[in-house]
Amino acid sequence: MSEATWLAAAAVLGLAGMAGLALAMDAHWSQVMRRPAGEALHTRRMLRALGAAALLLSLAACLMADRPSMAVLVWVMLLAGSALAVAMALAWLPTATRPPRAQESNDERRHGQTSRR
């Protein structure tokens, strides 16, 4: 496989790993799934293990793409980028998944207007 393919695989695995580790946390699980985190303890443990495995596979993919000194540097940068992407997605998620009516009334409240329908 080419270097670009290995690096693309490393990026996808890094993103999946960070997403898995984030969803394994109580606050993020409750935010995304909209149910208490205690109900899914086994699922969250599995996400934590799979997230860690995906990050290790991401490192392995980086090592296949380049020499070790460069691969570790690229892997660390991929981890930082993946963590940022997951954090931004989790910050945006409540707005994206809110029903349109609730979002509209929230916007009106923010701008000091009342609904007259």
Image (spheres, rainbow, N blue to C red):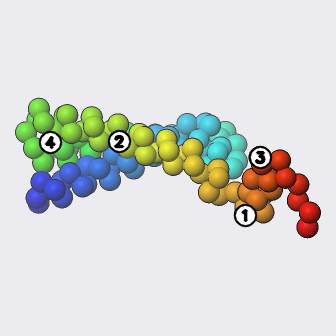
Which mark, residue 110?
3
Is the residue under label 4 in contact with that under label 3 (CB below 8 Å)? no
Q: Is residue 2 above or below residue 54?
A: below
Of the two numbered discs 2 and 4 on the same chain, state the one appearing first in sequence.
4
Mark 3 or 1, closer to the camera: 3
Residue 50 is at least partly visible in this image: no
Of the two numbered discs 3 and 4 on the same chain, state the one appearing first in sequence.
4
Look at label 4 and name its amino acid: Leu
Is the residue under label 3 in contact with that under label 2 (CB below 8 Å)? no
Q: CA distance from mark 4 to mark 1?
A: 46 Å
Of the two numbered discs 2 and 1 on the same chain, state the one appearing first in sequence.
2
Q: CA distance from mark 2 to mark 4?
A: 18 Å
Q: CA distance from mark 3 to mark 4?
A: 49 Å
Residue 60 is at least partly visible in this image: yes
Look at label 3 and name its amino acid: Arg
Look at label 1 and name its amino acid: Pro
Look at label 2 and name its amino acid: Gly
**Residue underneath mark 4:** 63
* Residue 20: percent from left, percent from top: 46, 45
